[in-house]
Image (cartoon, rainbow, N blue to C red):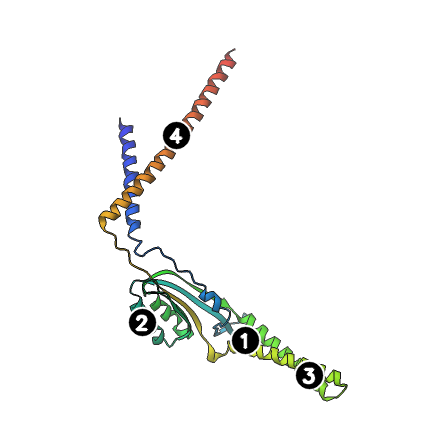
Amino acid sequence: MKRLKRLFFWLILIFIVLYIFRLAYGYTKTFDDTTYETAFFENISSSKRNYASKKYKVQSNNVNQTAIKVDQKYEKIAEIKTKSSSFEQEEASSRKTIEQFNALIQFEQKSGNKGYRKLNLVVGVPPENFDSLYNKLIKIGKVQAKQITKKDKTNEYKELNAKKQSLEKIRNSLIDLKSKGGKIEEYMGLENRILEIEQQLQGLGVSLGDFDDENEFCTVQFSLLEGKEVKIGLMQRMKVALEWTVSMYLQIITILFFITLFAYLILLVIDKLQLFERILNKK
């Protein structure tokens, strides 16, 4: 009798725990499940990149040597996806916040009809204001996703500089060679080669320009989506939670029943085999 009571107690406890879990989970669903997929950030990611630098000293292990100065170049990107039922108010708040921290909206996309609007912003923010702006923006609306990524770009910067210096040496050598005269075909070939190098140097100049101290920015990719807030009454929540709990409870009980039945059959077979073995041993 005690075992039966204990069994009923655990069965009822499992049901109550499942019900409370589902009821609590329902309160986390405050917005509709409509998703707004956008490739905006992917499309513009290669057209403009923001870089920043950090200067610091690394102390050498040798006491006689002075500290080594390091100029690190890095790319820091924050991604924020938030949702709001007060789209216009939250949009105004986000723009005001961006302006407050001396940040610059570099790319913008706004689309959708009322009730389904979306705003995508790529913001360049001074490195010293990055954390403050990020902490303010994640308080706008209801954040769906957020992350910060930081990549070291020091080697890339050094490679660009080395390539630039190499091209400049080649260009100067070709210019010197051109001044010595020669055949028209050779002269034209040198001119074309010099022109190609000049074009490559211009491209490198643009890439290196992104690393200049005066252009230093970190990036914030901010996405504001409009979503209708779900208004669900207590009775409706309790009804949905009860339906889910009954369904899940029956599934769990069914699984436990078949596991128990399978274990019983296995034990029964083992018992029969042992009995059969004992009979054979007696003979």
Q: Say which residue appears at 26% left-offset and 48% top-offset.
A: 237
Q: Is residue 17 visible?
A: no
Q: Are marks 1 and 2 in contact (CB under 8 Å)?
A: no
Disc 2 crowd rating (10 Å Cα; few below 14, some 14-19, many 20+) is few
Look at the picture and state if 15 lies above or below 184: above
Q: Which one is in front in this view, the residue at disc 1 or the one at disc 2?
A: 2
- The label shown at residue 191 is 3
Q: Are marks 3 and 1 in contact (CB under 8 Å)?
A: no
| Sequence-first disc among 3 and 1 | 3
Which residue in the structure is indicated by mark 1?
207
Which of the pair 119/56 is nearer the observer? Answer: 119
Mark 4 secondary-structure assignment: helix
| Residue 84 in the image, given as x and y percentages of width and height | 31, 63
Q: Residue 168's quadrant in the figure? A: bottom right
Residue projecting furthest to the right: 183
| Residue 246 in the image, given as x and y percentages of width and height | 30, 39
| Sequence-first disc among 4 and 1 | 1
| Sequence-first disc among 4 and 3 | 3
Q: Are marks 3 and 2 in contact (CB under 8 Å)?
A: no
Q: Say which residue appears at 25% left-offset and 48% top-offset.
A: 236
User: Tag 1: residue type?
Assistant: Ser
Disc 3 crowd rating (10 Å Cα; few below 14, some 14-19, many 20+) is some
Which residue in the structure is indicated by mark 4?
260
| Sequence-first disc among 3 and 2 | 2
| Sequence-first disc among 2 and 4 | 2
Q: Residues under labels 4 and 3: Cα distance?
A: 87 Å
- The label shown at residue 92 is 2
Q: Residues under labels 3 and 2: Cα distance?
A: 55 Å
Look at the picture and state if 176 lies above or below 281: below
Q: Is residue 24 visible?
A: yes
